[in-house]
Amino acid sequence: MRPVRQGSEQAVFWACPVCNEIVAVTHQDGGTLRGAANAALFANHHTMKAPITVSPKLLSPEEKRDRWVEIWASVEFATGSAE
């Protein structure tokens, strides 16, 4: 995955190095890494919660962080190959 920063640069968007689609987004909240996946990319293979549409450009940096803490899940990255 290729890390990308956008907007207020508080979160890291993770892009596929092949197709450049945003796969997930993460934010470090104190000692907790929180994130969300791009549900549209997994819809054919996994059941996920309904997507939430937002307009992050309308939120202040503080409002963005508060929203992430409220609705994003804790994230843990695994290292190595999935083979």
Image: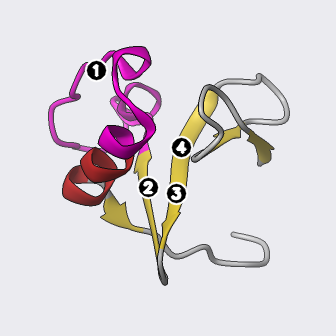
Give amino acid for label 3: His
Q: Nearer the viewer, residue 3 or 8?
A: 8
Q: Estimate how packed mark 1 is, as few (under 14), some (14 to 19) or many (20 or more) residues with alpha carbons within 10 Å.
A: few
Residue nearer the viewer, 46 or 64: 64
Q: Which residue is mark 4?
A: 24
Mark 1 = which residue? 54
Amino acid identity at mark 2 = Gly
Task: Give the amino acid type for the residue marked by disc 1 in the picture.
Answer: Val
Q: Give the CA separation, mark 2 to mark 4.
A: 7 Å
Q: Are marks 2 and 4 in contact (CB under 8 Å)?
A: yes
As drawn, 3 above or below 44:
below
Chain-order first, disc 2 or disc 3: 3
Task: Tell me the magenta residue range.
Answer: 37-64
Q: Secondary structure at mark 4?
A: strand
Q: Tag 4: Cα neighbours inside 10 Å, few (<14), some, or many (≥20)?
A: some
- Dot 2 lies on which element? strand
For the residues labelled 1 and 2, the Cα–Cα distance comes to 15 Å
Name the residue that disc number 2 marks: 35
Determine which of the numbered discs, if any, sits on residue 69 in the image.
none
Which of marks 2 and 1 precedes in the sequence?
2
